[in-house]
Image: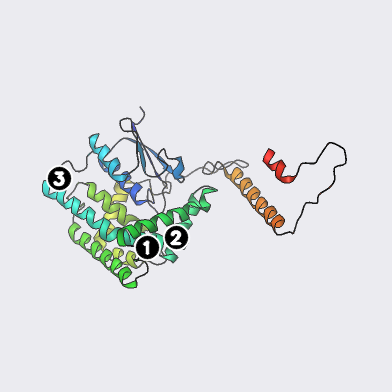
Amino acid sequence: MAAPMELYCWAAGWGLPSVDPDCLTVLTYARFTEAPLKLHKLSNPWRSPAGRLPALKTREEGVLSKTHEIITHLRKQKYNADYDLSARQGADTLAFMCLLEEKLLPALIHTFWVDAENYVVHTRKWYAEATPFPLNFFLPNRMHKQRLEQLQLLCGDDCLEDEERLEKLYHEARECLTLLSQRLGAQKFFFGDSPASLDAFVFSHLAPLLKAKLPNGKLQQHLKSLENLCNYCTSILSLYFPWDSGDPPATAPRPPAPEGSDSEEDPHKWRNQILSVLVALGAMISYAMLSGIVSIPWTEPSLPGRWPISLEEEEEKE
């Protein structure tokens, strides 16, 4: 029987089931509640029915593309990770989620998308390699611009130019991590032995910071110094995502592709290579013609009543 709901999210990477925090939140919540989902892991957000990721395709409400809308819908379908929480625990959940958004999220956006070294060496590199041609030429830059706008909306337009405000941003993020560590203590999850929605949000914020190989990891170093938070992330990965870290299980090696055939992992390999060559060739010809290195001489018609078609007209006709 087909799953009644379909979830579209960013592909796995960095040892995580998805590299995107919003997708990771929805995935984790769905695993906590055992919601029946047909999962589509994509590296092209335009293949999603919403044109963005994450996206949940449902029978009742169509396509949902915001994290809180997706989780609300799962709750309506009786997949509620907070069912056993008390009123006080519910209030604590809201308070800590606000803390994550106000104090930790801005520093995470800056770490992955604004810090020049981290962005070029790690974040942009992954998205450029994972995204198919020709989307990989402009999608990472588009996402970079969106994250900048998000950061300015959270912290103000001048937060990136003021060194004191930037240092304060990271100071508050470190305090938030310390507070989360103190609240978790020796517990398995934030409200005892069973995971709740707060655990899904905390995990999706901490796991990318913990697992990413960042050249500039000042915030990452503070997280790694908090042993219980590191064990917390590792435990959730091993319990709920045993085979979803982006690597196949060691007990089930992938058979090699036969000679002369394309790999199943990249079914459009030859098409993409041919397109790349054609694009490069077209760019070289255009540059040569515009710079005057190559010119097309004009010749008189050899037969009356018949005129040769110019290059521009021929292209337009095709």
Q: Is residue 104 left or right of residue 85?
A: right
Towards the viewer: 303 or 176: 303
Image coordinates of residue 267 in percent, x first then y, are: 55, 41
- With respect to residue 280, does 260 lie above or below? above
Mark closer to the chain start, 1 or 2: 1
Q: Which residue is mark 3?
A: 85
Crowd tier of the residue under label 3, counting other residues whose Cα lies within 10 Å: few below 14, some 14–19, many 20 or above: few
Crowd tier of the residue under label 1, counting other residues whose Cα lies within 10 Å: few below 14, some 14–19, many 20 or above: many
Between circles 1 and 2, the one closer to the viewer is 1
Question: Marks 1 and 3: in contact by CB < 8 Å?
Answer: no
Crowd tier of the residue under label 2, counting other residues whose Cα lies within 10 Å: few below 14, some 14–19, many 20 or above: some
- Tell which residue pokes out farthest to the left in this image: 87
Image coordinates of residue 48 in percent, x first then y, are: 42, 40
Q: Which residue is mark 1?
A: 111
- Amino acid at dot 1: Thr
Q: Is residue 270 visible?
A: yes
Question: Marks 2 and 1: in contact by CB < 8 Å?
Answer: no
Q: Rounded to the nearest whole Å, what is the CA distance between mark 1 and mark 2?
A: 11 Å
Q: Rounded to the nearest whole Å, what is the CA distance between mark 3 and mark 1?
A: 33 Å
Q: Which residue is mark 2?
A: 122
For the C terminus, the quadrant is: top right
- Amino acid at dot 2: His
- Amino acid at dot 3: Leu
